[in-house]
Amino acid sequence: MKECKYIPRLETDRLVLRKLTPDDTEDLRKWLGLDEVYTYWGRPASKGEKNPELLFEDPRPWVKRKPSSDFIWGIERKDTGEIIGMIEVFDVENDRMGMVGYRIAPWLWKTGICTEALRRVVRFIFTETRMDRLQGEANVKNIGSNRVMEKSGFKLEGTIRHGKMVSEYCDYNIWGMIREDFEKG
Protein backbone atom coordinates (compact mmCIF):
# COMPACT_ATOMS: atom_id res chain seq x y z
CA MET A 1 0.00 0.00 0.00
CA LYS A 2 1.48 3.34 -0.94
CA GLU A 3 2.55 5.61 1.88
CA CYS A 4 0.26 8.62 2.05
CA LYS A 5 1.51 11.88 3.61
CA TYR A 6 -1.36 12.34 6.00
CA ILE A 7 -4.38 10.20 6.80
CA PRO A 8 -6.65 11.90 9.33
CA ARG A 9 -9.01 9.87 11.48
CA LEU A 10 -12.60 10.71 10.49
CA GLU A 11 -15.79 9.60 12.23
CA THR A 12 -19.48 9.28 11.45
CA ASP A 13 -22.32 7.89 13.56
CA ARG A 14 -21.47 4.28 12.69
CA LEU A 15 -17.95 4.44 11.26
CA VAL A 16 -14.34 5.35 11.83
CA LEU A 17 -12.29 6.10 8.73
CA ARG A 18 -8.61 5.54 9.52
CA LYS A 19 -5.25 4.50 8.17
CA LEU A 20 -4.98 0.76 7.58
CA THR A 21 -2.30 -1.17 9.45
CA PRO A 22 -0.93 -4.73 9.23
CA ASP A 23 -3.22 -5.56 12.19
CA ASP A 24 -6.17 -5.19 9.74
CA THR A 25 -4.98 -8.05 7.52
CA GLU A 26 -7.43 -10.66 8.84
CA ASP A 27 -10.43 -8.33 8.44
CA LEU A 28 -9.33 -7.48 4.88
CA ARG A 29 -8.86 -11.17 4.05
CA LYS A 30 -12.59 -11.79 4.66
CA TRP A 31 -13.75 -9.61 1.77
CA LEU A 32 -11.03 -7.72 -0.15
CA GLY A 33 -10.19 -10.54 -2.57
CA LEU A 34 -13.76 -11.69 -3.28
CA ASP A 35 -14.66 -11.75 -6.98
CA GLU A 36 -18.00 -9.99 -6.44
CA VAL A 37 -16.22 -6.92 -5.04
CA TYR A 38 -14.63 -6.46 -8.49
CA THR A 39 -17.67 -7.19 -10.68
CA TYR A 40 -17.74 -3.57 -11.92
CA TRP A 41 -14.26 -2.48 -10.82
CA GLY A 42 -12.76 -2.81 -14.31
CA ARG A 43 -10.26 -5.47 -13.24
CA PRO A 44 -10.03 -8.59 -11.08
CA ALA A 45 -8.60 -8.55 -7.56
CA SER A 46 -4.84 -8.11 -7.50
CA LYS A 47 -2.39 -10.46 -5.81
CA GLY A 48 -2.17 -8.03 -2.89
CA GLU A 49 -5.95 -7.81 -2.56
CA LYS A 50 -6.21 -11.60 -2.49
CA ASN A 51 -3.34 -11.74 0.02
CA PRO A 52 -3.75 -8.52 2.03
CA GLU A 53 -0.59 -9.05 4.09
CA LEU A 54 1.26 -8.12 0.87
CA LEU A 55 -0.33 -4.66 0.92
CA PHE A 56 1.86 -3.78 3.88
CA GLU A 57 5.13 -5.06 2.42
CA ASP A 58 7.35 -2.86 0.27
CA PRO A 59 8.33 -4.97 -2.76
CA ARG A 60 11.29 -2.66 -3.44
CA PRO A 61 12.50 -1.30 -0.10
CA TRP A 62 15.69 0.08 -1.65
CA VAL A 63 13.69 2.63 -3.71
CA LYS A 64 13.32 6.02 -2.04
CA ARG A 65 9.77 7.25 -2.55
CA LYS A 66 8.15 10.50 -1.64
CA PRO A 67 4.84 10.30 0.18
CA SER A 68 1.75 10.31 -2.01
CA SER A 69 -0.86 13.10 -1.93
CA ASP A 70 -3.56 10.42 -2.03
CA PHE A 71 -5.78 9.48 0.91
CA ILE A 72 -6.56 5.82 1.68
CA TRP A 73 -8.84 5.03 4.60
CA GLY A 74 -10.02 1.75 6.04
CA ILE A 75 -13.72 1.82 6.95
CA GLU A 76 -14.14 0.47 10.47
CA ARG A 77 -17.46 -0.32 12.14
CA LYS A 78 -17.65 1.42 15.51
CA ASP A 79 -19.77 -1.35 17.00
CA THR A 80 -17.39 -4.21 16.13
CA GLY A 81 -14.04 -2.55 15.38
CA GLU A 82 -13.90 -4.58 12.14
CA ILE A 83 -12.53 -3.17 8.86
CA ILE A 84 -15.38 -3.69 6.40
CA GLY A 85 -14.36 -1.42 3.53
CA MET A 86 -11.93 1.04 2.01
CA ILE A 87 -12.42 4.52 0.61
CA GLU A 88 -9.84 6.52 -1.28
CA VAL A 89 -9.14 9.88 -2.84
CA PHE A 90 -6.46 9.07 -5.39
CA ASP A 91 -4.76 10.50 -8.46
CA VAL A 92 -4.62 13.81 -6.61
CA GLU A 93 -3.41 16.47 -9.04
CA ASN A 94 -1.62 19.53 -7.68
CA ASP A 95 -3.65 19.34 -4.45
CA ARG A 96 -6.56 20.61 -6.58
CA MET A 97 -8.57 17.60 -7.68
CA GLY A 98 -8.80 13.87 -7.11
CA MET A 99 -10.73 10.71 -7.90
CA VAL A 100 -12.84 8.86 -5.34
CA GLY A 101 -13.22 5.11 -5.06
CA TYR A 102 -14.64 2.75 -2.47
CA ARG A 103 -15.08 -0.95 -1.76
CA ILE A 104 -17.10 -2.62 0.94
CA ALA A 105 -17.74 -6.17 2.10
CA PRO A 106 -20.56 -7.58 -0.07
CA TRP A 107 -22.71 -8.59 2.92
CA LEU A 108 -22.94 -4.88 3.81
CA TRP A 109 -24.06 -3.64 0.39
CA LYS A 110 -27.28 -1.59 0.47
CA THR A 111 -26.79 -0.56 4.12
CA GLY A 112 -25.80 3.07 3.46
CA ILE A 113 -22.26 2.57 4.73
CA CYS A 114 -20.55 3.70 1.50
CA THR A 115 -22.75 6.79 1.31
CA GLU A 116 -22.04 7.61 4.97
CA ALA A 117 -18.29 7.19 4.44
CA LEU A 118 -18.23 9.15 1.17
CA ARG A 119 -20.18 12.06 2.63
CA ARG A 120 -17.65 12.28 5.48
CA VAL A 121 -14.71 12.19 3.05
CA VAL A 122 -16.33 14.89 0.90
CA ARG A 123 -16.76 17.10 3.98
CA PHE A 124 -13.11 16.59 4.94
CA ILE A 125 -11.84 17.35 1.42
CA PHE A 126 -13.84 20.56 1.02
CA THR A 127 -13.33 21.88 4.56
CA GLU A 128 -9.79 20.73 5.39
CA THR A 129 -7.91 20.71 2.07
CA ARG A 130 -7.40 23.02 -0.89
CA MET A 131 -9.00 20.60 -3.33
CA ASP A 132 -11.66 22.12 -5.52
CA ARG A 133 -12.95 19.02 -7.36
CA LEU A 134 -13.72 15.38 -6.67
CA GLN A 135 -14.63 12.96 -9.43
CA GLY A 136 -15.81 9.37 -9.51
CA GLU A 137 -16.51 6.83 -12.20
CA ALA A 138 -19.04 4.01 -12.08
CA ASN A 139 -19.95 1.37 -14.62
CA VAL A 140 -23.49 2.13 -15.79
CA LYS A 141 -24.49 -1.40 -14.71
CA ASN A 142 -23.32 -0.74 -11.14
CA ILE A 143 -26.57 0.66 -9.82
CA GLY A 144 -25.35 0.68 -6.21
CA SER A 145 -22.23 2.74 -6.87
CA ASN A 146 -24.12 5.20 -9.04
CA ARG A 147 -26.66 5.65 -6.21
CA VAL A 148 -23.86 6.25 -3.69
CA MET A 149 -22.49 9.06 -5.87
CA GLU A 150 -25.92 10.60 -6.35
CA LYS A 151 -26.90 10.38 -2.66
CA SER A 152 -23.54 11.88 -1.68
CA GLY A 153 -24.20 15.02 -3.72
CA PHE A 154 -22.19 14.30 -6.87
CA LYS A 155 -23.60 15.46 -10.20
CA LEU A 156 -23.76 13.17 -13.21
CA GLU A 157 -21.52 14.92 -15.73
CA GLY A 158 -21.76 12.44 -18.56
CA THR A 159 -21.49 8.88 -19.78
CA ILE A 160 -18.50 7.52 -21.61
CA ARG A 161 -19.71 4.99 -24.13
CA HIS A 162 -17.51 1.97 -24.87
CA GLY A 163 -14.68 3.60 -22.93
CA LYS A 164 -11.85 2.01 -21.01
CA MET A 165 -12.43 1.95 -17.27
CA VAL A 166 -9.24 0.63 -15.67
CA SER A 167 -8.72 -2.39 -17.97
CA GLU A 168 -12.28 -3.08 -19.09
CA TYR A 169 -14.18 -1.56 -21.99
CA CYS A 170 -17.69 -0.58 -20.94
CA ASP A 171 -20.12 2.30 -20.63
CA TYR A 172 -19.43 4.28 -17.47
CA ASN A 173 -20.72 7.40 -15.79
CA ILE A 174 -18.55 10.30 -14.69
CA TRP A 175 -19.69 11.96 -11.47
CA GLY A 176 -18.26 15.24 -10.21
CA MET A 177 -18.48 17.62 -7.30
CA ILE A 178 -16.78 20.96 -6.94
CA ARG A 179 -16.33 23.01 -3.78
CA GLU A 180 -19.19 25.31 -4.83
CA ASP A 181 -21.58 22.32 -5.04
CA PHE A 182 -20.56 21.27 -1.51
CA GLU A 183 -20.99 24.77 -0.11
CA LYS A 184 -24.47 25.11 -1.64
CA GLY A 185 -25.23 21.76 0.01
Image: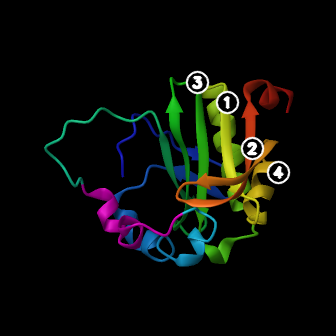
Q: Earlier in the sequence, mark 4 or mark 1?
A: 1
Q: Is residue 30 left or right of residue 145?
A: left
Q: Name the outermost residue toward the front.
A: 162
Q: Indicate which disc residue 133 carries.
A: 1
**Magenta region: which residues?**
43-57
Give how far across and how far down residue 158 sits, in percent: 80, 43
Q: Measure the alpha-carbon separation of dots 2 and 3.
A: 16 Å
Residue named by callout 3: 96
Q: Earlier in the sequence, mark 1 or mark 2?
A: 1
Q: Residue at x 40, y 39 (%)?
A: 4
Residue at x 60%, y 29% (from the top left corner): 97
> Residue shown at 35%/72% (left/top)?
51
Work out whether 181 lies above or below 57.
Answer: above
The CA span between labels 2 and 4 is 11 Å
Amino acid type for the residue under numbered disc 3: Arg
Badge 4 density bin: few <14, some 14–19, many ≥20, Cα 10 Å: some
Q: Which one is earlier in the sequence, the residue at label 2 or at label 4?
A: 4
Kindly check if marks 2 and 3 are in contact, taking CB atoms under 8 A apart as contact: no
- Taking the magenta stretch, the answer to whether it contains residue 48 is yes
Q: Residue 43 location, x and y as percent?
A: 52, 64
For discs 4 and 1, the disc positioned in front in the rendered view: 1
Q: Which residue lies furthest to the left in this view?
A: 62
Label 4 to label 3, Cα distance in Å?
23 Å
Q: In this view, does 179 lie above or below 44?
A: above
The answer to whether the residue labelled 2 contacts the one labelled 4, judged by CB atoms less than 8 Å apart, is no
Under circle 1, the secondary element is: strand
